[in-house]
Amino acid sequence: MKTSKPIVISLLVGIVVIGTAALYFTKFLADFSPKSSLDEVLSAGIELFEKKQYQDARAKFEECYEKAPEGSNLGNRALLFISRCYGAQGAGEKAAEFWGKVIENPAMRANHAEAFYSLATLRSAGGTAEDRHAAEDYCKKAAAVGSGSRFEDLAKIELASLMLGKDNLAGAQQILQKLLKEKKDYPQLKRAMFKLRMKLLFSPAITEVPESQYYVVQGGDTLEAISKRFGTTADLLKESNNVDPRRLQIGKRLKVVTGKFRLKVSKSRNILQLLSGDMVLNEYRIGTGKFSSTPVGEFKIVDKVKEPPWFKDGRVIRYGDPENVLGTRWMKLESVDEQSQLSGYGIHGTDDESSIGKESSQGCIRLFNRDVEELYKIVPVGTEVTIED
């Protein structure tokens, strides 16, 4: 029996189709197997990265980066994480090298803002004028990328911080206020706003919060007399106006802060807040009393002493003695409750910086010396202090 010609043709076509399909399937298996394996390596690297095991994580990412096809999404993701690993490890030069590769890759445009911001923070850490200029340039490039990532916002905050370092308060304020209006919520923004508010407080600029005004020096005026008249401190008058109290000129215009300050202490957070009205001007890390011995309630500052002596067991331990635990400043607290018998508590500095952030004192509130010195300049005797659990 003879086979018809159409059947033979159909069989031949079927054989060709099946053969072609087999070839493509074989190629698919060959291609899929390495890709699947590299996906697993990348996932393992990300898991290590999230555990902050950066050295081991980087080894995984480098394997992916070397073996992945050039320009593939897998290779690009590995490159991104290699850059992050070097940054997290503090390897600045290598981090800069790989962030540079991210920027050179058009396919990674969505990551360019992060790359520019990371390069900016690396240069900011350098500390030289050249580093600051380069950091500012990178921040501007990150902010201009337009990808809508949080790194654009962080770059703007870093740019504002660099401006504050150059006392460009108006420029920094414009950037930070815009981010606040957009309801951005970053710890970096909060810290930058505190820095700005303190810079403004210690500058000649008139502020609405805390309220301030100009005063023209009259004959017989002293900074002490002016500070008592307006309920501020001579230290704040001196620093915000950059004046020598011994050479106070009649007719000179001074900025005088008339707004009232108050302090709020959170024992559970080990934080002291400086407020004017409802605005938090700054936050300071503190140490509080062991076994929750710092009292809670409403208090006021009744005395302030520079380079204070410490009275212990009937002895006077002078400032500078290693046994004196009061640091460079002391502000005595007194309860506003007339029935209270609490005494001997205050806010002071410390040379033991490891004690900050802990329950470490005998009941007083302690700050870094640099922080208590700043606070001492700002708050006058009579300032209200609220201490909460």
Image: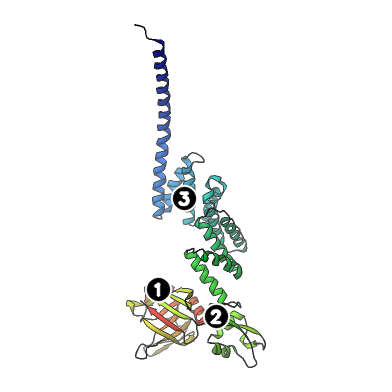
Q: Is residue 144 above or below residue 72?
A: below
The residue lying furthest to the top in this view is 1
Q: Is residue 212 above or below residue 117?
A: below
The residue lying furthest to the bottom in this view is 220
Residue at 66%, 85% (x, y): give it.
Answer: 252
Callout in the foreground (3, 2): 2
Query: What residue type is disc 3 on?
Result: Phe
The quadrant in which the N terminus is found is top left
The disc placed on residue 270 is: 1
Query: What residue type is disc 1 on?
Result: Asn
Query: What residue is pinned by disc 3?
Result: 81
The residue lying furthest to the left in this view is 291
* Residue 348 visible at all: yes
Query: What residue is pinned by disc 2?
Result: 211
Q: Earlier in the sequence, mark 2 or mark 1?
A: 2
Relative side of 214 to 31, left or right: right
Residue at 39%, 13% (x, y): give it.
Answer: 7
Q: Is residue 130 above or below residue 100?
A: below
Q: Give neighbour class at mark 3: few <14, some 14-19, many 20+ (Cα, 10 Å).
A: many
Assign a secondary structure to mark 2: loop
